[in-house]
Amino acid sequence: MLGLHQDHPLLISAILEHAAVNYADVAIVSHAGAEIIRTDYARLAARTRRLASSLRAEGFRPGSFTGSLAWNTHRHLELFYAVTGIGAVLHTANPRLTPSQIAYTVNFTGYDTLFIDLDTLALAEQLAPQLPNTTRYVIMTARELMPHTALTNVVCYEDLIDVGKDNFSWPVLDERTASTLCFTSGTTGDPKGALYTHRGCVLSALSSGGGNGWALSADDGILAVPGYFHCNGWAVPFLAPMYGTRLVMPGRNMDTAFLHRLIMEEDVTVGPAVPTIWLQMLDYCRAHNLRLSNLNRLFTGGTAPPAVMIDAYLRDYDVRTFHAWGMTETTHLSTSSFIPRDLPRDAAIEKMRSQGKPVFGNEIRIVDDRGALVAHDGTTPGHLQVRGHWIAGSYFRRPDIALMTEDGWMQTGDVVVIDPDNSMHIVDRAKDVIKSGGEWISSQALEEATNRHARVVESAVIAVEHPRWQERPLLIIVGEAGASLTADDVRAHLIPLVPKWWLPDAVAFVDELPHGPTGKIQKDVLRLWLQDGKIRP
Ligand code: AMP
């Protein structure tokens, strides 16, 4: 027998309307190039409805694709809702990819209209000759700031808002309708697309915003650092209106002093960003003897934050680190650390280092090389597999790439250990782990231990072939400018921190490490350096 609850599809447009009604005057601050816009959810929703009606009048239909190449601003947020709300799909192209990768993702998707902002105009001009299908550019800026440009067929975004209708109402769509499309950063081969659904986006925000995840409420203010093109901006475009939080969007500017000013002046309580941003903030606060006002939690992921960073924020600033794991293929987070309030400090830091447990709606498991299940015993590593409502079931138009197991779990490519209480600890990417004499050495753990040396700025570990052990770690280090640092210094530092057989036989020093568009060290580039003799074991 069916129950008697009402049946409404889970749609993204409902999130914005919820905020417009219930958190109408909650502040939204947007730094869009030279413009600083102060608005609220009611006004943002009104503009979004007008934009949606214009898009529809222009012929956008359920299933149409369009794209954005833009930083986090109120206009990009409006676009997120307007496009998805009418059943069309927004490809948020990632301006941090290489131009040829961006062109690949736009052409692979195929659409005629690309929304850009003033800070991506030069990039769009450079890309335009490579985008044969993209024949129209909408510049997301004020009319008086419309630039001279080499692009042809250019429209001002504000004109679309002006001709829109106030009385537009959102269509009722199937909740499995595609909403947004994000591509992986393509470290191996071409970027791969993850095509999200309305249902997955709504459920993931509902679940991850709760107490064991982001723990959001209308008391909070979020600084939207993660680009809307990376994992849906870590769901901030959905979480903020759903939970009625203040929303501060910095646009393109990721300068530490600027982000610090926003935290102080705009009453930011939650800061989502990759660890690099928070490490720079820590240095900046220390160097200038600054506080962090009402910021009380960092929300971090992408790579594991160092324990010293977690410790320093907690000890010196009373800021807790909420640590999450996710990937483009999991929309944003899948697991998140939870730190009970009464834990002693050391135990709390240990908890914050874990990538945490699945939020409701996700499950995790580990398997060995042959696919057999591995126990969640806190010591045995295995290949991580996940399943849930917002986990990709296949790649966009790439049925040739195997993503799933036969029994319906997504293969992540990460190697992890899972505790008996189901808390997860990332060991490494499967392709980065060093297989030494049948045992695994975690390149990430070795890097973290190395980075604790006061004169090490950054480090990376890759495998080199070894006749006896199969593989051994090569440690590559960027030392502090002017500091004399030897391989023996580093090995002496590592002895108490890692098992003896992990100690790298070879240490190389370089001026800089190569980083990808999401801040991760590009180990495939390091492997090429090794092959080309640019670094030597
Ligand atoms: P991306 O698709 O660019 O978001 O990259 C996803 C990958 O980033 C994952 O498969 C992990 O290898 C890594 N990653 C994400 N979150 C974390 C985390 N909290 N700690 C360590 N690695 C992470």
Image: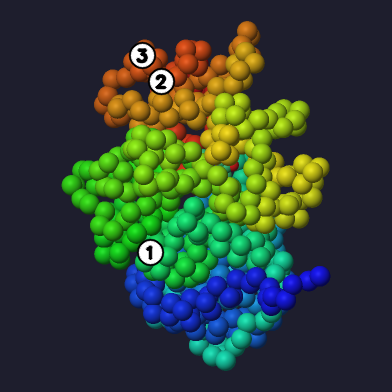
In this view, the mark in front (3 or 2): 2
Q: Quadrant of residue 180?
A: bottom right
User: Decide: marks 3, 1 in contact (CB < 8 A)?
Assistant: no
Question: Residue 189: image x %, image y %?
Answer: 67, 42
* Depth order, front residue of 252/294: 294
Residue that appears at 37% across and 70% down:
29
Residue hosting label 3: 492
Classify residue 396 as left or right of residue 130: right
Question: Residue 158: image x %, image y %?
Answer: 48, 81
Q: CA distance from mark 3 to mark 1?
A: 45 Å
Mark 1 within 8 Å of ligand 1, using the beta carbon: no
Which element carries disc 3, helix, strand or loop? helix
- Marker disc for residue 497: 2
Check disc 3 and give the amino acid type.
Ala
Residue hosting label 1: 220
Tell me the crowding category of disc 2: few under 14, some 14 to 19, or many 20 or more residues within 10 angstroms, Cα based: some
Which element carries disc 1, helix, strand or loop? loop
Question: Residue 495: image x %, image y %?
Answer: 40, 15
Mark 3 within 8 Å of ligand 1, using the beta carbon: no
Q: CA distance from mark 3 to mark 2?
A: 10 Å
First of labels 3, 2 by sequence position = 3
First of labels 3, 1 by sequence position = 1
Residue that appears at 81% across and 70% down:
1
Q: Quadrant of residue 369?
A: top right
Q: Quadrant of ligand 1?
A: top right
First of labels 1, 2 by sequence position = 1
Q: Quadrant of residue 510?
A: top left
In this view, the mark in front (1 or 2): 1
Classify residue 312 as left or right of residue 238: left
Residue 17 higher or lower than 481, as above or below:
below
The answer to whether any part of residue 34 appears in the image is yes
Residue 163 higher or lower than 231, as above or below:
below
